[in-house]
Image: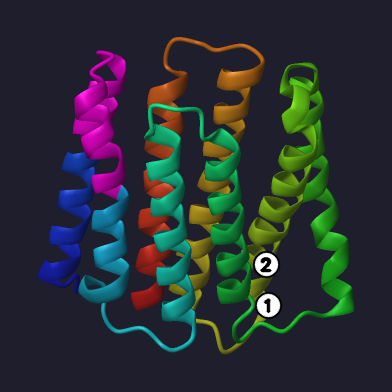
Amino acid sequence: MIRPSTLLFVAATAISAAFAIVAAARHDRQGYYLFKPLTTFIILLGAAWLVQPGGQPYRSLVVLGVALSLAGDVLLVLPANRFALGLAAFLLAHVAYIAAFSTGSPLAVSQLAWLVPFLAASVAITAYVWSGLGKLRAPVLLYVATISVMVWRAAMRGQAAAVPRASFLLALLGACLFVTSDAILVIRRFRRPFRTAHALELAAYWAAQVLIALSVRA
């Protein structure tokens, strides 16, 4: 049975996310600057307190990942160009998620082969936007490698008997949506923006964070 606090968490996130997406579509800077960080802050509250219970250290690492993502959101909505700093904050968030997804799921040599398809997909997207990256090529390459490892570690949790099946599936879907969101972001910023790109990027991003937060309880 779904707890009322979990329903409240999901509903509050969805409402705030909808306001942020509408504000972005209308080029309402004040609304966007308010609701983008607020939505991630609600997810942080959910991961930390509303989505109970959660085993340590998995829960603490997920909370850290969401907190670093919130820092990235704030940096990316600042009037000045803080893209590189925002990228660094999200890179650290993925490091926290890598640590979380490795909890109870130790690294095995046999798992390394599964990293290849995730890296290949990330390399393909990076190659597509390469000409537009300019001075950000090195940071983006580091970020791409990190997020590839993140989604790979989420996938490898399914091999650990101690990891609940629901937690594994929620975290894996969340990790995949995070990659999807970031892929849309780099295509929108550095190659070929399309009309619904920003809305899809934000929707996938917050869905990813919610699913990862819910994996704590599961």
> Which residue lies under the disc numbered 1?
159
Q: Amino acid at mark 2?
A: Arg
Label 1 vs label 2, nearer the camera: 2
Q: How is the image coloured?
A: rainbow
In the rendered image, the quadrant that contains the C terminus is: bottom left
Q: Main secondary structure of the magenta part?
A: helix
- At 19% from the left and 28% from the top, the residue drawn is 31
SS assignment at label 2? helix
Give left or right: position of 60 versus 92: left
- At 34% from the left and 76% from the top, the residue drawn is 217
Residue 126 picture location, percent across and down:
76, 31
* Tag of residue 153: 2
> Residue 80: in sight, yes or no?
yes
Q: In this picture, is 183 found above or below 128?
A: below
Q: Amino acid at mark 1?
A: Gln
Q: In this picture, is 120 found above or below 95?
A: above
Does the magenta portion include 38?
A: yes
Residue 113 picture location, percent across and down:
88, 62
- 3D distance between C-alphas at marks 1 and 2: 10 Å
Quadrant position of residue 179: top right
Does the magenta portion include 124?
A: no
User: Which residues are drawn in magenta?
Assistant: 18-39
Looking at the image, the residue that sits furthest to the front is 80
